Image (spheres, grey):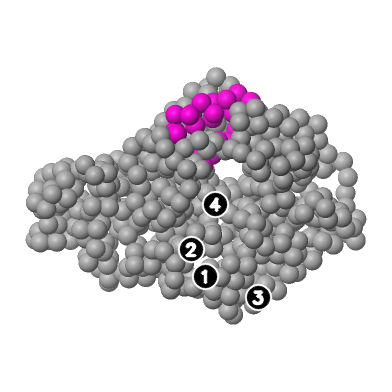
Amino acid sequence: MSMLNLPQGQIARIRDYARDIAGQVQEHIDRHTTQTVERAVVRLMGLDGANDEGVPYPNVIVDHLQDQLPHGAAAFLANAVLHTGLSLSDIAWQVDAGILDLTTLPMADPRIVADTACRLVEPQMERIAANRRWREEKISGEGRRTHPLLYVIVATGNIYEDVGQAKNAVKSGAEVVAVIRSTAQSLLDYVPYGATTEGFGGTYATQENFRIMREALDEAGSREGRYVRLVNYASGLCMPEIAVMGALERLDMMLNDSMYGILFRDINMYRTFTDQHFSRMVNACAGVMINTGEDNYLTTADAVDKAYTVLASDFINERFAYHSGLTPALMGLGHAFEIDPRLENSFLLELAHAWLVRECFPEHPLKYMPPTKHITGNIFQAYMLNTMFNLAGQMTNQGIQLLGMLTEAIHTPHLQDRGLACHNATYVMNAAKDLSAQFTLKPDSFIVTRAQTVLDQCEDFLRQLVDVGLMQGIEQGLFADVKRLRDGGKGLKGVVTRADDYFNPLFPVFRKLLPTAHVA
């Protein structure tokens, strides 16, 4: 039932603007690849491992083929398999040792090379498909949800300590566990190999760490009688590779935003837009839900004055996600409860914003972020604000509720802090289970009027952005009050213009599995 009675024609116009804005960027994406897209491809061909110095073999191969990347790394690697009969890891070892040069091997018949590359991809794609089937079977038996998924984070830096904290959180009621990534990993142009026990502000995202936590959550979930979802970050300079590793190890959600890395990590926008498209196609094949990062805008811009930028970014992220073949059920679009609590009627404003996003995206499992910007060392006030946040999430039917911690501004949460957060959310969502169905909003009410105002501002903003272009809009600081140059930031050298004969063995797979995706 609609609470706001928003003009559907206006929402359709806004989606048209978002389509035009994303389409302009898609023209660039279709002409380019990146170093990390190529590394993701060779990972999906089955290459894994690292040399004695810890350099991942996908980096070894792609760095070796740097001058040939316009043609795609897959053809050269498949050709080496045909000529040498060696395994991919043995080929990588010989390349790393200087024994083998992939660029000097005579190129076999292109059709045979392509068939070989596609054959190498098949086992990994079947593993990903099997992971998806397993997840969907487990979740389908849980029945209809009556409250948002309860989402918590762990962030010790040590994957084995993370496991203990995650299991404890599941016992307290957590349904989604995110392993926060080590500070600045998004700026590394490689993915560390193996299990890790040291990290600052979080734990390194590696395939082995994914495997360890997946196993732990399956065990904990089995004891509690529910499937527990695992989250990490497919973002930064290795966005596509991390999406591949997550798909292989059955992660369930990935923070996978189209602009977060540009705005908040100063990663080049050409690199980011190209990487997010490929990574989201991997996620779409794997049935992995993306989470976007609009909540971050409100850490640098005012949550009332710039509320329309959050909504506008949601529409843009939605369109990019459609380009990658994702369905609405896999789009965890983001927003947040970040209005200054001292502001009169702040809770009504929060409800207006939350209902607005909910009704603009009725089929999407929205990710609702807790108050952080205005949290202080006063744990009682923090707990109170988190209670209001949980009430807003239940009332407006959010899909994913990232639980706030009463010690948010003090230290990394202790076990009891996470437990209290779960108990708070469980109580509020049970106590207010059918609250929103008990009343209606007057057409001229504060909440309806505020929601319509933000929708109008969003339409005006996107109409102007169609003419300006998304990249120039980012240069002007129109999102989050942060300015980034299109030719600046980290990773620009890793962007490669495709040659006419560029080959990627994943493209036929994407066309088959994702008929609505934009695969060029």
Q: Position of residue 495 (x, y in %)?
A: 35, 66
Verify CB contact (< 8 Å) between mark 1 and mark 4: no
Verify CB contact (< 8 Å) between mark 4 and mark 2: no
In this picture, is 184 found above or below 320? above
Give the residue number, with chain letter if any, for mark 2. 266
Q: Nearer the viewer, mark 1 or mark 4?
A: 1
Label 4: state its secondary structure. Answer: loop
Label 2: state its secondary structure. Answer: loop
Give the residue number, with chain letter if any, for mark 1. 484
Label 1: state its secondary structure. Answer: loop
Give the residue number, with chain letter if any, for mark 3. 463
Q: Which residues are magenta?
A: 158-180
Query: Which residue is the extreme one toward the top?
Result: 223
Residue at screen point 73% across, 69% down: 457
Q: Nearer the viewer, residue 397 or 97?
A: 97
Sequence-wise, the earlier of marks 4 and 2 is 2
Give the residue number, with chain letter if any, for mark 4. 327
Q: Nearer the viewer, mark 3 or mark 2?
A: 2
